[in-house]
Amino acid sequence: MICLSAIATRPRWCRYRALLPPDYTTVYYGGTPYYYANDTYYAWRDSTQQYEVVDPPGDPNAASTEAPPPPPSQNGDVFVYPKNGQSEEDQSRDKYECHKWAQGESGFDPTQPNGGVSPDQTSTKRAAYQRAIGACLEGRGYSVK
């Protein structure tokens, strides 16, 4: 059953809602957002494009209203500045070629979840990737920080 009204209290009879109640609060459990209002938790479901009424997600003491930190940038948290007046085309090509080389050297791909490695290897492999891409870009005339 889909509830279209945004105003309801404790909608146990309703599994999905098109709208959240106006006084909802976003809370995060393990980095996942839940929406809380009127003693009821909701979770967004892409499959139905609706909010689903769900059981409380976990220990109330583990909840946070702070959003989790953003994922690492797609270029591995490396900031690059062209020192030799490289064109946009040159910069794009150099970044791509250095990314591919650093990926091959380190086994880490920042475009994949966890860099495409096991979670226990993520920080070590990310550091190796950053060193490799930095060395490659510096060799091509860029300032890398």
Image (cartoon, rainbow, N blue to C red):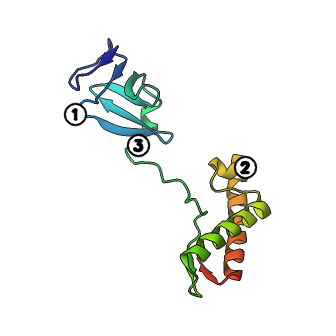
Identity of the amino acid at label 2? Val
Q: Which mark is residue 22?
A: 1
Q: Is residue 119 above or below residue 63?
A: below
Measure how far apart labels 1 and 2 are at the Cα level.
42 Å
Location of the C terminus (image quadrant): bottom right
Q: Position of residue 75 (x, y in %)?
A: 60, 63
Q: Quadrant of the N terminus?
A: top left
State the mark number for residue 92: none
User: Mark 3 or mark 2, which has the lower sequence index?
Assistant: 3
Instruction: Determine whether 22 is above or below 95 in the image.
Output: above
**Residue that label 2 marks:** 117
Q: Residues within 10 Å of mark 2 (few under 14, many from 20)?
A: some
* Label 3 crowd bin: few (<14), some (14–19), many (20+), radius 10 Å: some
Against 13, residue 45 (above or below) is below
Do the CB atoms of the residues marked 3 and 2 lie less than 8 Å apart? Answer: no
User: Residue at 37% of width from left, 27% of height from top?
Assistant: 50
Q: Secondary structure at mark 2?
A: loop
Q: Position of residue 32 (x, y in %)?
A: 47, 38
Q: If you read the primary sequence from the N terminus, does the residue marked by circle 1 or circle 2 appear first?
A: 1
Please report contact status of discs 1 and 2: CB closer than 8 Å, yes or no: no
